[in-house]
Image: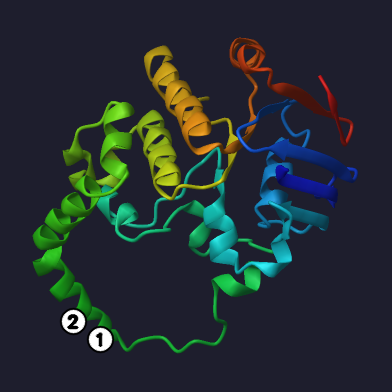
Amino acid sequence: MAALTLKRLQPLRLEPIDLQLAAGELVFISGPSGAGKSLLLRAIADLDPNAGEVLLDQQPRSGLPAPEWRRRVGLLPAESGWWADRVGAHFMAPGVDDASVPIAGETGAHARDSAQPGASQPAASVVAAETAVAAVAEPTAAAADRQRAQASPLHPLLAQLGFEPDVLDWDVLRLSTGERQRLALARLLANRPEVLLLDEATANLDPANRERAERLIDAYRRNHHAAVLWASHDPDQRERLAPAIGGRRFVVDAGRLQPE
């Protein structure tokens, strides 16, 4: 049984696509910049307009609430989102990842679930009071975040990606591009998705950290039987990882997805 099935899925600027990924299968997609690789991944995640159908273990995407779909079919975008000042705030609640918070320009069928137009705004005095309380509670919140991380799948994920637990106390502004990318991967995997949609997951990493990330993704695929659809510009990476496990490789060119 296919873990992920695309039936005539048509993202922006691409022709309809039929594709099946089995549980535990790795599939690479490549192609020139602007060919539509990211558009395909975003269409599967239902973040951009698309036609056709996507199924998870034969269950239609349209039959699942948006937060559940995006938890089970997890997207790691090329540029991860950071919406709070402190790293640990992004790991506070189960199921919080890049696709479960409102996204600017979100126009897929599930976009209506991400925001409530017309909601009233709090008074300025209320905002000021809440800000003051949050400032006093910050040390307690940071300690609580660390405790949650240590008791969750996140703690070993951080370690495997080369981080100490105190990374949760860091200010987001001090993070390098590569650190943000590794932390976004940890955030994604902590949600235990059944399908991974990876958009240049290791593009900004040095060789040592790229190897760490590749090992972690492969271990997650094997241990959780997760299907992985990975967009990568790196031919060495595709050649190194795909043949070892019989993974398929496709290329997006001239609006079509075809075998590499």
Residue 19 point in image, percent of width and height: 81, 39
Residue 218 point in image, percent of width and height: 50, 25
Three-letter code for the amino acid on which mark 1 is drawn: Val
The secondary element bearing badge 1 is classed as: helix
Mark 2 = which residue?
A: 129
Residue 107 point in image, percent of width and height: 69, 64
User: Given contact means CB atoms under 8 Å apart, are the residues at marks 2 and 1 in contact?
Assistant: yes
Is residue 169 left or right of 257 when viewed as pictured?
left
Is residue 259 left or right of 219 when viewed as pictured?
right
Mark 1 = which residue?
A: 126
Three-letter code for the amino acid on which mark 2 is drawn: Ala
Residue 210 point in image, percent of width and height: 44, 19
Q: Nearer the viewer, residue 99 or 147?
A: 147
Q: Is residue 174 visible?
A: yes
Q: Can residue 14 be seen in this view?
A: no
At a point 24% along the width and 87% down the height, the residue shown is 125
At a point 71% along the width and 56% down the height, the residue shown is 48
Q: Is the residue marked by circle 1 packed among few (<14), some (14-19), or many (20+) residues within 10 Å? A: few
